[in-house]
């Protein structure tokens, strides 16, 4: 989609359809609340046409409502945003996403940008608009023999803004495109079926994706290299697989990096399929376990967006890829395996495999001594019980880092909630014949117990935060800018916001 800025205008650009926002004002008349439409920032002639329509008298501009009419031969879509004093950035994002769906049949659309501006924050509002359109345009239709491609090619952004900050506006559009494209790249990886996205194929696809991004390096390690690194927990998950374990190690170094440049490390769970291993999942629970690599896709997407935006922060991204399958060599429950950090783990349940892969990857990442280490993983079904499918679980050993992540998620309008890691849960993960067990004594508090396990692999006093995206990684049918079925790409924008703050 091409976005063209048309500044310093009070006219309606010629296009197949014109999208314009309207607000609503409610006054008490006598004992009745009466709502009327507010048309601030509307071009004069358009306002006149609107008011000349008989049915427009009933239109109040309430949130979520729309009104269509024709103005000199071209269609106009009015998008209701409700009370201007109460409107939020998420309201605007959602209404624009719905508007995109209504106008994607046109080739060229103009948007009255000023009517969608949140509290005069123009760059932020441009980003919301561009992200909403690009995220909503996403489709995973490569396996359909017949599919319809969206028509919308060009979006003209009309604004009365004088244009003195045109460069900054253009940068905001470009950056938003990088972010939305990265969200869509993550969705593509997650939606890819497991017979295509083998660990080895996934690693190559990531490498290919970053090939031309300045400042980015990519190294792929396989079983041999992982053996040298003593990553036996990771390898134990891969033992039953016909495909090689892959650790993808990405770095992005900004062009003006100095000694003081912050270094953030990401680790992502990349289970391209989770059968549960010998602790086999029942069929119903196994369905859709191709999405068990969503953590890796999420951190990778944030990484590539940051690199494309040329953010002044050094980023390492470690992706641990394998499937969790069964064959005669697969790890059996009761196995005791020594981790990269020397701790022994009794693997009582081979379905608690994500933490094993993450453990070795986290230890590996701590060796790089980052200023902060953030991991993302579809780690526990318990997270869906605790926080539903809409909220991302956050656990951390560092309150400052946790609060910065919460702040970032707020500014991205994504839900995140912190769970504690209490000493009792740390104790529950200790073993009797080994240092640790990979499951606790009971199911209760499973999400944070998994975090207590991961915490055993954090060293060098690294500030660490764990994001359990088991709920939010998949379908978010309440969000009009996410596909109703399949990978959501949620949390990518929170991580980008976090990187921007650093
Ligand atoms: N990948 C799953 C977690 C998961 C389950 C994500 C359902 C999304 C939906 C993970 O590897 C797993 O199987 N975890 C077990 C842990 C248990 C054995 C302690 C779980 O949640 O059941
Ligand atoms: Mg599992
Ligand atoms: Zn898993």
Image (tube, rainbow, N blue to C red):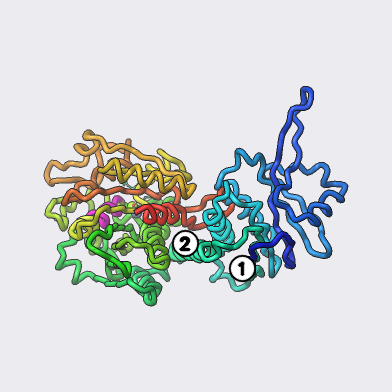
Residue position marked by numbered label 2 in the rendering? 179
Q: Pick the residue in front: 242 or 483.
A: 483
Nearer the observer, 23 or 430: 23
Question: What percent of the width, then of the height, locates residue 146?
Answer: 63, 72
Q: Residues within 10 Å of mark 2 (few under 14, many from 20)?
A: many
Q: Quadrant of the N terminus?
A: bottom right
Separation of residues labelled 2 and 1 (CA atoms): 18 Å
Q: Which residue is mark 1?
A: 4
Where disc 2 sits, the SS reads: helix
- Residue 358 within the segment the image draws in magenta: yes
Depth order, front residue of 156/449: 156
Q: Quadrant of the C terminus?
A: bottom left
For the residue carrying disc 1, how many other residues have a C-alpha within 10 Å: few (<14), some (14-19), or many (20+)? some
Above or below 206: residue 477 = above
Residue at disc 1, secondary structure: strand
Give the left or right position of residue 156, taking residue 30 as reference.
left
User: Quarter for ligand 3?
Assistant: bottom left
Q: Is residue 118 above or below residue 30?
A: below
Specify the quadrant of the image occupied by residue 81. top right
Q: Is residue 181 visible?
A: no
Question: Does the image show residue 247?
Answer: yes
Label number found at residue 40: none
The magenta stretch is 352-359
What is the x, y in percent for residue 107?
A: 69, 70
Left or right: where does residue 123 sit relative to residue 224? right
Looking at the image, which residue is at 50% across and 65% down?
A: 171
Q: Quadrant of residue 74?
A: bottom right
Position of residue 325 measured from the top left corner of the image (x, y, whole percent): 32, 61
**Badge 2 or badge 1: first in the primary sequence:** 1
């Amino acid at each position: 989609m091409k976005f063209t800025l048309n500044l310093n205008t009070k006219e309606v650009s010629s296009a197949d359809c014109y999208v314009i926002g309207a607000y609503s004002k409610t006054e008490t008349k006598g004992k009745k609340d009466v709502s009327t439409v507010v048309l601030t920032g509307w071009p004069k002639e358009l306002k006149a046409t609107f008011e000349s329509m008989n049915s427009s008298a009933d239109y109040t501009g309430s949130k979520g409502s729309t009104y269509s009419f024709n103005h000199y031969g071209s269609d106009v879509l009015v998008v209701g945003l409700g009370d201007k004093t109460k409107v939020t950035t998420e309201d605007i994002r959602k209404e624009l996403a719905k508007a995109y769906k209504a106008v994607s049949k046109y080739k060229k659309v103009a948007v009255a940008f000023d009517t969608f501006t949140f509290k005069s924050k123009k760059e932020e509002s441009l980003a919301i608009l561009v992200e909403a359109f690009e995220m909503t345009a996403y489709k995973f239709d490569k396996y359909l023999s017949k599919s319809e491609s969206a028509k919308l090619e060009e979006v003209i952004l009309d604004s009365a803004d004088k244009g003195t900050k045109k460069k900054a506006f253009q940068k905001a559009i470009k950056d938003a495109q990088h972010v939305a494209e990265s969200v869509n790249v993550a969705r593509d990886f997650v939606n890819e079926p497991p017979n295509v996205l083998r660990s080895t194929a996934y690693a190559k696809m990531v490498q290919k994706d970053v090939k031309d991004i300045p400042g980015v390096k990519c190294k792929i390690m396989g079983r041999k290299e992982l053996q040298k690194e003593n990553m036996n927990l990771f390898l134990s998950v891969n033992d039953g697989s016909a495909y090689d374990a892959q650790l993808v190690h990405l770095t992005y170094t900004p062009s003006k990096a100095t000694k003081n440049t912050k270094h953030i490390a990401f680790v992502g769970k990349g289970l391209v399929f989770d059968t549960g291993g010998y602790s086999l999942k029942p069929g119903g629970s196994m369905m859709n376990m191709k999405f068990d690599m969503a953590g890796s896709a999420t951190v990778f997407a944030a990484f590539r967006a940051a690199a494309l935006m040329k953010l002044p922060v050094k980023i390492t991204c470690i992706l641990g890829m394998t499937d969790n399958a069964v064959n005669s060599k697969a790890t059996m429950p009761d196995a005791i395996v020594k981790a990269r950090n020397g701790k022994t783990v009794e693997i009582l349940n081979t379905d608690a495999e994500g933490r094993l892969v993450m453990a070795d990857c986290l230890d590996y990442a701590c060796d790089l001594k980052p200023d902060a280490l953030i991991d993302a993983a579809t780690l526990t079904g318990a997270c869906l019980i605790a926080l539903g499918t809409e909220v991302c679980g956050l656990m951390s050993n560092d309150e400052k880092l946790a609060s910065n992540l919460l702040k970032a998620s707020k500014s991205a309008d994504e839900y995140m909630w912190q769970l504690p890691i209490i000493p009792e849960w740390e104790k529950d993960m200790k073993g009797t014949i080994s240092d640790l067990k990979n499951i606790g004594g009971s199911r209760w508090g499973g999400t944070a117990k998994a975090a207590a396990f991961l915490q055993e692999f954090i060293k060098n006093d690294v500030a660490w935060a764990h994001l359990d995206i088991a709920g939010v990684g998949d379908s978010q049918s309440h969000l009009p800018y996410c596909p109703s079925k399949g990978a959501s790409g949620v949390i990518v924008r929170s991580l980008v916001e976090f990187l921007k703050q650093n």
